[in-house]
Amino acid sequence: MKKSSNDLFKRVYAVVAEIPYGKVTTYGTIAEVCGISSSPRTVGWAMNKAPEGLPCHRVINKTGILTGRVYFGDPDLMKELLIAEGVEFTGDGRVNMKKHLWIPKSEDI
DNA sequence: GGTCTGACTAAAT
DNA sequence: GATTTAGCCAGAC
C-alpha cells in the first residue's frame, strides 16, 4: 500500500487550496513545501488536472507572470480574478508578488 | 512497458 | 542580455 504519488498531488492541492484571498504563490514555492523543490513542473502539471474549486489562478510562476492563463478558457480570466481579489499588477502585466506573495508551510499541510 | 510531455526554474552557452 | 538545455516527478499514449 504505498500510494507514493497520489499523496504528492494531495499536498499540492492542499497548499493551493490554502492560499488566502488576495494572495498568490509560485510553483517553486509549492513544490518546495511538497518536498519536490527540484521539480516545480510536477506542480504545474498537477494544476493541469486540478479539480474545480481549486484557486489555481493564484498560482503563478516565479517571474510573476500568469502562466497557463489560457488553460482557464479565457486568457484574461486569470488576471481578472486576481484583480477582483485585490491583487496588484505591474505595468508589465505581472503580479506584484512583492506584496501578495504567500508562502505556505509544510506543517500546515 | 517504454517514451513523451507538461501551467517551472536555474544554469550554461 | 537572451535563448537553450538540463533536471525533476507523475500521468497519458
Image (cartoon, coloured by chain):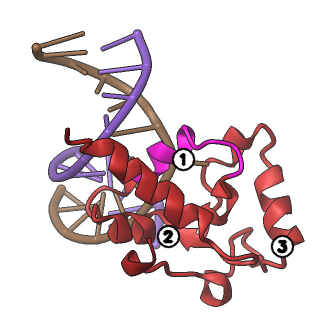
Chain colours: A red, B brown, C purple
Q: Are marks 1 and 3 in contact (CB under 8 Å)?
A: no
Segment tinted magenta in the rendering: A43-53
**Label number found at residue A95:** none
Three-letter code for the amino acid on which mark 3 is drawn: Glu
Q: Is residue A58 magenta?
A: no
Q: Secondary structure at mark 2?
A: loop
Judging depth in this view, the residue of A95 and C4 nearest the camera is A95
Amino acid type indicated by mark 2: Lys
- Relative vertical location of residue A3 with respect to residue B9 in this rendering, above or below: above
How packed mark 3 is, by other alpha carbons closer than 10 Å (few <14, some 14-19, many 20 or more), is few
**Would you say residue A50 sits in the magenta stretch?**
yes
Q: Give the residue at x 71% y 50%.
A: A53
Q: Circle 1 — which element?
A: helix
Q: Is A106 situated above or below A12? A: below
The dot on residue A85 is: 3
Q: Point out the frontmost of discs 1 and 2.
A: 1
Label 1, residues with CA under 10 Å away: few <14, some 14-19, many ≥20: many
Q: In this rendering, do the residues under marks 1 and 3 share a single chain?
A: yes
Residue found at x 83% / y 61%: A81
Q: Residue A13's x, y, as percent?
A: 52, 55
For mark 2, what is the residue? A62
* Residue A47: mark: 1
